[in-house]
Amino acid sequence: MRSFRKILVPVLSSAMILSLITGCGEKDNSEEAQETVVTVETGKPSIKDISISYNFSGTVEANDVVNVIPKVAGEVIEKHFSVGDHVNEGDLLFRIDDTSAQITLKQAEAGLTQARAGLNSQVAAQASTYASATETLGKISTNKQQLGVAVDSAYATAVQANAARDNANVNSEYYDEAYENAKSAVEDITKAKDAAKAALDKAIRDGDEEEIAAAQTQYEKMDSALKTAESNRDQAELAKKSGANNARSAEAQAYVAQENVGIAVKNKQDYETYTVNSTLYGANAQMVGADAALTNSKAGVTQAEANVENAKLALDYTQVSAPVSGTITQINVSEHNMAGQQAPAYVIQSDAKAKIVFYVAEETMKFISPGNSAVVTKNGKEYDAVIKNVENTIDQASGLFKVEAEPTGNGSELISGSLVNIKTITRESKNAVAVPINCVYYDGSQAYVFVAENGFAKKVNVVTGLSDDTDMQITEGISAEDSVILTYSSELKDGVKLKFNN
């Protein structure tokens, strides 16, 4: 056929060639019309816990050995049990002479009683100080008012003194004038008397009896008037001196009154500027001091209570009990000999189960937690165990992190010092969104899945997490509500039409 077709091609007409071309084109269109349909099953991702476990080499270590060391030293007055005896946690092993501890406790209790009495006294003292300070502060306003009244009174007294001074000065001037008038009257009457004397002398010389009698009468009248005028002058002089004295006294009183005003004003200012502040500071200092003393008393009570507790604790320490249940393997004390803190008094082999010790790297340590289950394998036999402790510091000898597990059930069969395998969870994700492993495809390092959307396949890039034997965790890309294509098929492509088999 191939040779035949090659021979025919050169002799074909253009019409035939066109016919062949047209026929081929129709055949291709028919094939494209037959669209690819992939039959699949779909389902939503599951929500589950996914974990990864790993086997480690471990060592069975012996039960805990507990050294019982007394916390106080003293003479052993009572001892119980012997080597080989089994004791329960809390059993009394031995007792130390507690005479000194009893005395110390009584002293501490007496000190507490004294401290409490001192506190009660200080509470009363504080109340008294507060009352006194409150009274002092309450008097500040009253004292201010009293000093204000004193200032007002000083001003009023000064006004009165000034008025009295002015009045005294007026009176003094009046008495001065009266005195001068009285002096003038004496001088005038003296002149009139002298004239009357001259007239009398003339009448006597003339010998005229009538003239003599008249002149004599006038002379006697002037003499009497002079005496009266001189008396008035003397009285006016006394009044003048008295007025001058009164004026000087009033002036002095006015000066004193004005000075009293200044003193009263300054007293009020000083009180408001200094005394009030000093009073406030003093009262505050008293209250602060009372508070501090009360605080010290309370601290004293607290310290005394601590002393009592310490004394009780020291007394309790004279009775040494077994800290764990187990078998006594060694006793280093005896009655009437001293027990010290340098060496263990009793050694007890604990009843605690043997532990499995293994070491892990830091990245693994972060995902191992106390409480995780584990399986220990020895000579083909499995023992259940639980992780008890994970150290968060590096073991200097191994450079790794120490992990301890405790066997459960029949784990007591494990022999101390033997090597075992232990398997435990090293990675775990709770409530993970997971799909079957065969649903996950890869394009190089990029993982992706197909989801069904409107009857067609849709390629979705995802980020994967942990996986177990059947499922793989999807941390990014899809949700628990997406319809994931569960069927593996090499024909699955982005946009291919789907036929559902579920």
Image (cartoon, grey):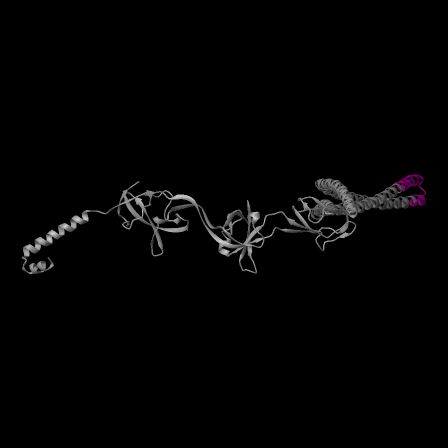
Taking the spot 30% from the left edge, 44% from the top edge, the residue there is 452
Where is residue 285 shown, x and y percent of the image? Answer: 71, 47
Foreground residue among 207 and 327: 327
Residue 82 visible from this viewpoint: yes
Where is residue 169 shown, x and y percent of the image? Answer: 77, 45
For residue 213: magenta? yes
Residue 279 visible from this viewpoint: no
Foreground residue among 91 and 310: 91
Q: Is residue 241 left or right of residue 453?
A: right
Q: Is residue 487 left or right of residue 467?
A: left
Foreground residue among 83 and 37: 83
For residue 90: magenta? no
Highlighted magenta segment, given as a residue range: 201-225
Q: Quadrant of the C terminus?
A: top left
Foreground residue among 204 and 102: 102
Taking the spot 94% from the left edge, 45% from the top edge, the residue there is 205
Q: Quadrant of the N terminus?
A: bottom left
Where is residue 393 shown, x and y percent of the image? Answer: 56, 56
Report the predominant secondary structure element of the magenta stretch. helix
- Total labels drawn: 0
Q: Is residue 486 left or right of residue 248?
A: left
Outermost residue on the front side: it is 379
Q: Is residue 354 left or right of residue 92?
A: left
Where is residue 218 shown, x and y percent of the image? Answer: 89, 40
